[in-house]
Amino acid sequence: MDFLSIYEIIGYIASILVAVSLMMSSILKLRVINLIGAAFFTVYGLLIGAYPIVVVNFIIVLIDLYYLYEIYTAKEYFKILGVANNSDYLKYFLSFHDQDIKRFFPDFSYTPAEQQLAFFVLRNLVPAGLFIGEIRDKDSLFVNLDYVIPGYRDFKVDKFVYSENPEFFKEKRLRKIHTLPGDKKHENYLRQMGFIPDDSNKNATSYYLVLN
């Protein structure tokens, strides 16, 4: 393999990474992948002596680094906002995001339960997440929907709910959260949030989280 082909491979990798970054719904993933792609383009430009490519992509690297710094250091405001079962806004939200919800929760269908607990998670006053669950056995919550809108899937909403705000559940005397995984991505997400498989459930693979 000669040096020219190596240069071409680096250029192709850079192009693919930049293209992939533009398909990310998460701003965080977009910035990270775009940063890597721009870094590859910078190296590619240096190798072939195309300095305009070097300058443009080095600037892009700096811009991505700046916004990643902003993302990780920004102080954000989170709040749990309860919502009534028959709320018009709740129904509209579910209808608007129906196709995206079905991607992660193909079996989800909104049917209000008698002991339902539903709430939005506001992130800087934006309704970024919707959680719908059913209270069972007095101290257990079964989560039917744990959905975060595109652009906010950097786990901050979920960490706020499950890790940083356990008092919300404890005030309702809830000690354990159960749920079923939607797809493989959602299953991996549950593990990252600290959920563990429930071996006692022989009918379906379920996960649970014990609140500290």
Image: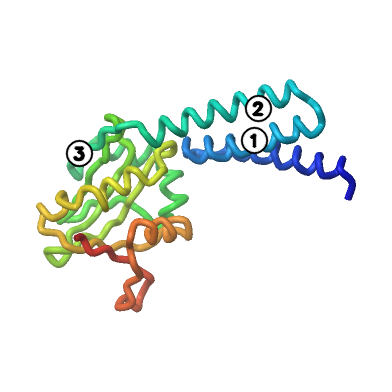
Query: In screen coordinates, is 183 left or right of 144?
Result: right
* Amino acid type, residue under disc 2 in the picture: Asn
Question: How much space separates mark 1 and mark 2, taking CA atoms?
Answer: 7 Å
Q: Tell me the element at label 3.
A: strand
Name which of mark 1 and mark 2 comes first in the sequence.
Answer: 1
Q: Nearer the viewer, mark 3 or mark 2?
A: 2
In the rendered image, the vertical position of residue 133 relative to residue 54, given as above or below: below
* Amino acid type, residue under disc 3 in the picture: Leu
Q: Which residue is mark 2?
A: 57
Q: Nearer the viewer, mark 1 or mark 3?
A: 1
Q: Which residue is mark 3?
A: 81
Q: Which residue is mark 1?
A: 39
In depth, the one of 212 and 201 nearer the eye is 212
The quarter of the displayed image where residue 181 is located: bottom left
Residue 21: % across, % down: 58, 38
In depth, the one of 162 and 43 nearer the eye is 43
* Amino acid type, residue under disc 1 in the picture: Ala
The mark tally for this picture is: 3
| Rendered-image quadrant of the C terminus | bottom left
Q: Are marks 1 and 2 in contact (CB under 8 Å)?
A: yes
Classed neighbour count for the residue bearing mark 1: other residues with Cα under 10 Å, few (<14), some (14–19), many (≥20): many
Question: How much space separates mark 1 and mark 3, taking CA atoms?
Answer: 41 Å
For image coordinates 75% across by 35% down, the residue present is 44
For image coordinates 44% across by 59% down, the residue present is 188
In the rendered image, the vertical position of residue 210 relative to residue 27, given as above or below: below
